[in-house]
Image: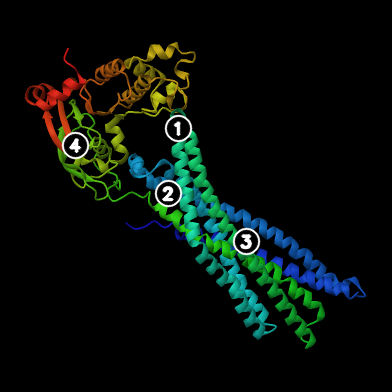
Amino acid sequence: MKKEEWILPYIKQNARLFVLVIFLGAVTIFSAAFLMFTSGFLISKAATRPENILLIYVPIVAVRTFGIARSVSRYVERLVGHHIILKIVSDMRVRLYSMLEPGALMLRSRFRTGDMLGILSEDIEHLQDAFLKTIFPAISALLLYAVSVIALGFFSWPFALLLAFYLFVLVVLFPVVSLLVTRARNAKLKSGRNVLYSRLTDAVMGVSDWMFSGRRHAFIDSYEKEEHDWFELERKKHRFTRWRDFAAQCFVAGLILLMLFWTAGQHTDGELAKTMIAAFVLVVFPLTEAFLPLSDALGEVPGYQDSIRRMNKVAPQPEVSQIKSAAETLDLQNVTLSFRDVTFSYDNSSQVLHNFSFTLRQGEKMALLGRSGSGKSTSLALIEGALKPGSGSVTLNGVETALLKDQIADAVAVLNQKPHLFDTSILNNIRLGNGEASDEDVRRAAKQVKLHDYIESLPDGYHTSVQETGVRFSGGERQRIALARILLQDTPIIILDEPTVGLDPITERELMETVFEVLKGKTILWITHHLAGVEAADKIVFLENGKTEMEGTHEELLASNERYRRLYHLDVPVK
């Protein structure tokens, strides 16, 4: 798969603004340089006690001009630069989310929560520094390097070449050596930060278990040790950075002395006025200020590469559908779901599904049984178009589900184990199934799922907030709200993905009775791992190791299959 590019495309898209920022950066540096140059000349000239103020009037005006130009150009440079970066980061986020969307259903199987949060926040934010702290300063510094050597050549080409070699050490050798020394350390810091991010996220999600297990102090001690090791590594990096910066400053001091000796010699030879000595020496300071950050800028390059590598990981894998629009329009009044010799595996691992086939026609109810890891969830992802089979086909009315894109939501609705309820009103949560539904439609759906009277008994009725993730309600009530949402969506096919997990037997039975009552006439695929209530299904398929182990009606299997009979009686004891 071709790796995504995260730097060059945005430079090309914003080429004119990039040139403007680099030009403004150069103007800022040159204004600072000329400010120091004219200031040095003005101080030296004023020290000679000129007879008339007009003799130094031009340098006075120049100092004020370059001082204003430096401030204005710096302000405009920052304004334009941050405008570009904010625009680029916004485009990057949209692009990253567009990459995530085709395989969104499988993110939990591909990434840990902490890793994903790190990619979405830290990595994409880190890339903005590639422009602000590396690309812009590096180009401006190289431009300044060339112009400074050429300008000095008008006074003395031999000294200009000497200065070119001297500055080459500061502009090129210092950054390269810094990169070689800190590359491995920066990689460890980046990797360690990602690990800490994941561990802390995992701990926050399981904080109650740490508390009740009485091992919270063990976790805190372990985490703090890892954090201490990370900070120690960071201190070593900063220690090297301080020594490197000290060496660079010493190098700059040598440059100042070199400039001082050259200007003194030029004055002795009568080539340079004494008032120009301070001007040439002082101009070194703003010039070297532009060169010193290059070591830090180049040292961050491995971090940018790691961020790009991590962001490229979220691109759809070969097995994830590169979803395209399907030209066909589904007949939503008569939809047939078909698996034909479907084979699927993750990343060339063992096959999750192997030649798996079934057909579910309009109005039929089918129970898909199997232990955890047998391929039930993978089958759901294939139906939703989030995955593409390695061989065979998954179709709705002959159209591959991977080609339906948003049309799949018109044909299939899912009631899963933990439907997400948003921190808004009950009315809005139910209306999520159909944005055009009226308040009366919402109430009608709530009545069908036997939730209306309870909602009306609440102080705010349908405007009651469900709170974050629906914590205000019990598991059964959350499932009924989600079921009402599905009724408003009104799709021909309903997939029940183990909706009763975590419910007590009475609530489970009542919920499933309600489900089959209100979904009468709909095509139902019930994914479950136990057999209580499967007699309501028209057909039962038992999936094991990716293959069909048993298939038939409840009565047929109960009469002819000893294993099915034994499993059924374990879930539904004989009275």
Residue receiving disc 3: 242
Q: Judging from the image, what secondary structure is the residue with disc 2 in?
A: helix
Residue receiving disc 4: 397
Q: Judging from the image, what secondary structure is the residue with disc 1 in?
A: helix
Sequence-wise first label, 1 or 3: 1
- Compared to 138, does 353 lie above or below? above
**In the rendered structure, are the residues bearing label 2 and label 1 in contact, judged by CB atoms less than 8 Å apart?**
no
Q: Residues within 10 Å of mark 3 (few under 14, many from 20)?
A: few
- Compared to 170, does 296 lie above or below? above
Nearer the observer, 66 or 238: 238
Q: Residues within 10 Å of mark 4 (few under 14, many from 20)?
A: some
Marks 1 and 3, how far apart at CA? 41 Å
Marks 4 and 2, how far apart at CA? 32 Å
Q: Residue at x 44, y 18 (%)?
A: 462
Nearer the observer, 26 or 160: 160
* Callout 2 amino acid: Arg
Sequence-wise first label, 4 or 1: 1
- Compared to 357, does 537 lie above or below? above
Residue receiving disc 2: 95
Residue receiving disc 1: 210
